[in-house]
């Protein structure tokens, strides 16, 4: 049996379990309400007088900071709590296939949430003539950023059987990943540290790498950054789960 | 099918499993007995590849669990201790997931689902979500998952735990039936199950195997085994006891609930003692209304070999 078949079986089960509870719909509604509020009210979409989604993408790192851990916190902690981890890991599936399958299911769920923001694209196209290439790049960057956040949440979720602990751990780690490149913070850091050090720290931040996408630039270094965060966090998830089983 | 050699698992300083070796062939049902915390579940988790052994080897169907875990896992159907399942899924969805993971598709999958649903009596709850089911049904749903691919090896960790007496009976029958063509290991701390379902039993205590044999062999280890118990209407118990004690081959005589029990010097004497007692009764014209040779009791054997030494001292 092919590896992909197993990955997709796990992913389908996981995705179905999102929609089996009302939590998925509550999440979708909250996500859409918040993006709407931040884009139009806090982001002053209309007052800007420009045909772009800058005020939309601007808030994504902050929204994801709280919402992505909420989506991913149960991934492994729930398996550990319910004992289904033992079931899953005694089925003929390699651990990486299970990890990837569960990650992809959650990522797809986030992609659905992000996809449902399409009215904002329609709105800006009706009102003016935006650069749709730039908007597309923004969506790609946003999805990659969500994936990176989710992979980190996957990792913290594997550390504990308690979803709340997993949530808090991932928010703390993600807060660092976000703030390290947040302009007010880097401006503050420059007073104490040399610019080279500040740049190095900022290079670890999703902010720095999401910037290009927002401006419509898809840079291979930014792509590489997100892909390696995902790869590293999922690898760490595997190591954590293996150590947990070894006792 | 299953070959385990010198299996060791340590958690920190504690040796949860300490040098366990045994093997199970097709057609055998091995009962795994032991007090709580003796290392039963840990052993089963190593056999099924959930946790890696600290030392020793596990081979199932010729495959090593460390070197080729997937081959081993394909051969095994496993019911973990708490019978976990995904509560938000329906019984059908859950079993279908298990079938997909085992590579079953199309007609083969449909037949497999039909077979386990019938075997585990799940037809009436098939569309219900698992979280709404009673414990017995949840347990059987997880058991059905273990049987879905008709595995050559079954590892069942306390398969009758939490079931009502009827369900226990059904599951034991199922195990015995399946045991004809499979290699089965199941753990329990209910001793009747050894008689009801096992061809062989192992008693494990503090990580070590302390007894290994057929149920009859284990029972024969009992102090009671081979003793003759008798009752005679309106007889003088003391006189009878003196008479019995004087018999050749009788080690000691006890009074139990108004019955007399004579223990033999040599347990392997078989029916010899009973015959001697009958002859004595005829000579003394005792009016016997009950006489039996004791087979021995498993729970006595179990208690004797698994009680901590300090408790044993006190019991004496």
Image (cartoon, coloured by chain):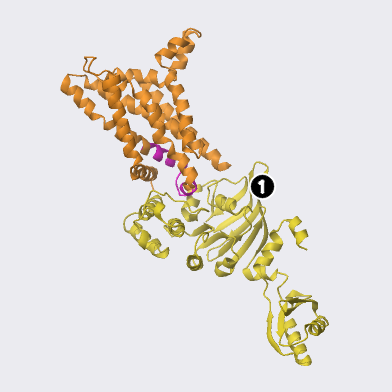
Chain colours: A orange, B yellow
Magenta-colored segment: predominant secondary structure: helix
Please indicate, yes or no, whether residue A217 appears anywhere in the rendered image: no
In magenta segment, residue A2: no
Report the quarter where the N terminus of chain B lies.
bottom right
Residue B277 falls left or right of residue A224? right
Q: Position of residue A239 (x, y in %)?
A: 52, 36
Q: Position of residue B23 (x, y in %)?
A: 60, 59
Q: Secondary structure at mark 1?
A: strand
Residue A153 falls left or right of residue B207? left
**Mark 1, residue position:** B15
Callout 1: 10 Å neighbours few (<14), some, many (20+)?
some
Q: Quadrant of residue A144?
A: top left
Magenta part of the chain: A85-104
Q: Residue under mark 1: which chain is it in?
A: B
Quick one: which residue is furthest to the front in this view? B234
In magenta segment, residue A86: yes
Camera-nearest residue between B201 and B135? B135
Camera-nearest residue between B148 and A66? A66
Q: Looking at the picture, does residue B57 appear above or below residue B191?
A: above
Report the quarter where the C terminus of chain B lies.
bottom right
Q: State the residue at coordinates (51%, 53%).
A: B82
Q: State the residue at coordinates (21%, 14%).
A: A49
Q: Position of residue B231 (x, y in %)?
A: 71, 83
Q: State the residue at coordinates (49%, 33%).
A: A236
């Amino acid at each position: 049996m092919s590896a992909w078949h197993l990955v997709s079986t796990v992913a389908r089960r996981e995705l179905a379990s999102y929609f089996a509870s009302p939590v998925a719909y509550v999440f979708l509604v909250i996500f859409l309400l918040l993006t709407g509020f931040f884009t139009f009210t806090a982001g002053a979409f209309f007052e800007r007088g420009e045909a772009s989604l800058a005020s939309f993408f601007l808030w994504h790192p902050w929204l994801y900071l709280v919402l992505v851990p909420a989506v991913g916190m149960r991934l492994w902690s729930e398996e550990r709590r319910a004992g289904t981890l033992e079931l899953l890991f005694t089925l003929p599936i390699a651990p990486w296939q299970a990890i990837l399958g569960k990650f992809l299911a959650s990522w797809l769920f986030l992609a659905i949430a992000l996809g449902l923001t399409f009215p904002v694209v329609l709105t800006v196209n009706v009102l003016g003539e935006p650069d749709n290439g730039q908007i597309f790049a923004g969506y790609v960057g946003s999805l990659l950023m969500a994936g990176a956040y989710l992979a980190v949440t996957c990792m913290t979720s594997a550390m504990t059987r308690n979803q709340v602990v997993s949530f808090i751990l991932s928010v703390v780690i993600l807060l660092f990943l976000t703030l390290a490149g947040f302009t007010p913070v880097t401006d503050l850091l420059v007073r104490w540290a040399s610019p080279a050090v500040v740049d190095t720290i900022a290079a670890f931040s999703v902010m720095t790498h999401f910037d290009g996408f927002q401006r419509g630039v898809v840079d291979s270094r930014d792509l590489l950054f997100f892909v390696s965060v995902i790869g590293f966090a999922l690898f760490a998830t595997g190591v954590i789960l293996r150590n947990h089983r070894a006792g | 099918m299953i070959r385990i050699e010198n299996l060791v698992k340590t958690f920190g300083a504690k040796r949860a499993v300490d040098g366990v070796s045994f093997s199970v062939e097709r057609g055998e049902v091995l009962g795994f007995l032991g007090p709580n915390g003796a290392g039963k579940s840990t052993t089963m988790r190593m056999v099924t590849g959930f946790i890696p052994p600290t030392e020793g080897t596990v081979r199932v169907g010729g495959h090593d669990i460390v070197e080729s875990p997937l081959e081993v896992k394909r051969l095994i159907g496993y019911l973990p201790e708490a019978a976990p399942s995904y509560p938000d899924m329906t019984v059908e969805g859950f079993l279908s997931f298990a079938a997909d993971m085992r590579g079953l598709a199309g007609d083969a999958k449909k037949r497999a689902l039909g077979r386990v649903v019938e075997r585990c009596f799940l037809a009436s709850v098939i569309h219900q979500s698992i979280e709404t089911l009673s414990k017995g049904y949840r347990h059987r749903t997880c058991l059905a998952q273990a049987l879905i691919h008709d595995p050559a090896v079954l590892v069942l960790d306390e398969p009758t735990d939490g079931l009502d007496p009827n369900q226990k009976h059904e599951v034991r029958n199922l195990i015995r039936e399946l045991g004809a063509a499979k290699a089965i290991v199941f753990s329990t701390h209910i001793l009747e199950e050894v008689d009801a379902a096992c061809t062989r039993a192992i008693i494990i205590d503090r990580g070590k195997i302390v007894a290994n044999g057929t149920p009859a062999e284990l029972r024969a280890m009992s102090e009671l085994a081979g003793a003759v118990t008798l009752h005679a209407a309106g007889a003088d118990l003391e006189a009878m006891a003196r008479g019995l004690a004087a018999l050749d081959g009788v080690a000691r005589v006890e009074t139990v609930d108004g019955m007399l029990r004579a223990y033999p010097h040599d347990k392997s004497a078989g029916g010899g003692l009973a015959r001697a007692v009958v002859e004595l009764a005829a000579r003394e014209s005792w009016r016997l209304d009950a006489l039996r040779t004791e087979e021995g009791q498993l729970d006595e054997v179990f208690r004797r070999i698994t009680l901590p030494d300090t408790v044993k001292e006190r019991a004496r």
